[in-house]
Amino acid sequence: MRLWPGSTPVSAAPVAPPVDLGHQIEEGLIVARSAVQQSTKNGIIVSIMRDGGLWSDHAAEEVAQAAIGALARELHETAERLESESQRAAPSEREERRARSRGDRARTAHRRVETRRLSMRSATLRGVANELEGIRHDDVEVSRLVTRARDDTLRELLHARLIPRASPVVLTEEQQRTAIEGVVADLDLLLLERSGH
């Protein structure tokens, strides 16, 4: 007769399939690019409205690079915090050896799973931050982000231009291109009137 449980295995949380770190980083980078694009668009709109400046690709690229840098720093800081939490969550060797009851073994198993989850999240964030740093120093990629941000801004202005005049209109690609050209022409005219050149 045994008075304590033997070495019967304790099933911890269901084991998740192995996570592909490269895939996680790729998905995180998609979200990060979108956030940078939105931040760039908002930064340009605010600077134009606040300062009364003109659209400048150079200024937009500076805003994009600043947004990329800020996001990369934030991701690195979060990754460091998660790594620290991962180390605190990890059961010590002593705790592993002393876990005799089923509950103790379940808790240590849960802590191991939590440690792996936090470590994977930290590695993913570091990977995304490193990719962002690469994009920040790649003029072609920054230019692409700025172009997308500019196009989104023009598209929003186009829809804002249409809202007061009519109910929502579904435009073909050609009609949308023509409307965007009209918005650009209107903006050029407004800028010309404002600057006097």
Image (cartoon, rainbow, N blue to C red):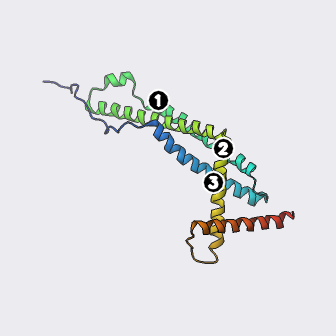
Residue 69: x, y in percent? 65, 41
The residue furthest left is: 1
The residue labelled by disc 1 is 87
Quarter of the figure with the C terminus: bottom right
Marks 2, 3: nearer the viewer: 2
> How many numbered discs, if any?
3
Residue 73: x, y in percent? 62, 39
Which circle marks residue 21 in the picture? none
- Spatial distance from mark 1 to mark 2, Cα to Cα? 39 Å
2 or 3: tag closer to the N-terminus: 2
Q: Residue 73: in sight, yes or no?
A: no
| Displayed quadrant of residue 92 | top left
Q: Is residue 83 left or right of residue 3?
A: right
Q: Is residue 52 left or right of residue 83?
A: right
Quarter of the figure with the N terminus: top left
Q: Are marks 2 and 3 in contact (CB under 8 Å)?
A: no
Amino acid beneath label 2: Val
Q: Residues within 10 Å of mark 2 (few under 14, many from 20)?
A: few
Amino acid beneath label 3: Arg
Residue lying at 26% horizontally and 32% vertically, measured from the top left: 10
Q: Residues within 10 Å of mark 1 (few under 14, many from 20)?
A: some
Q: Nearer the viewer, residue 59 or 111?
A: 59
Q: Residue 51: in sight, yes or no?
A: yes
The residue labelled by disc 2 is 140
The residue furthest front is: 174
Amino acid beneath label 1: Gln
Residue lying at 61% horizontally and 48% vertically, measured from the top left: 36
Against 73, residue 37 (above or below) is below
Which circle marks residue 148 in the picture? 3
Residue lying at 50% horizontally and 34% vertically, measured from the top left: 123
1 or 3: tag closer to the N-terminus: 1
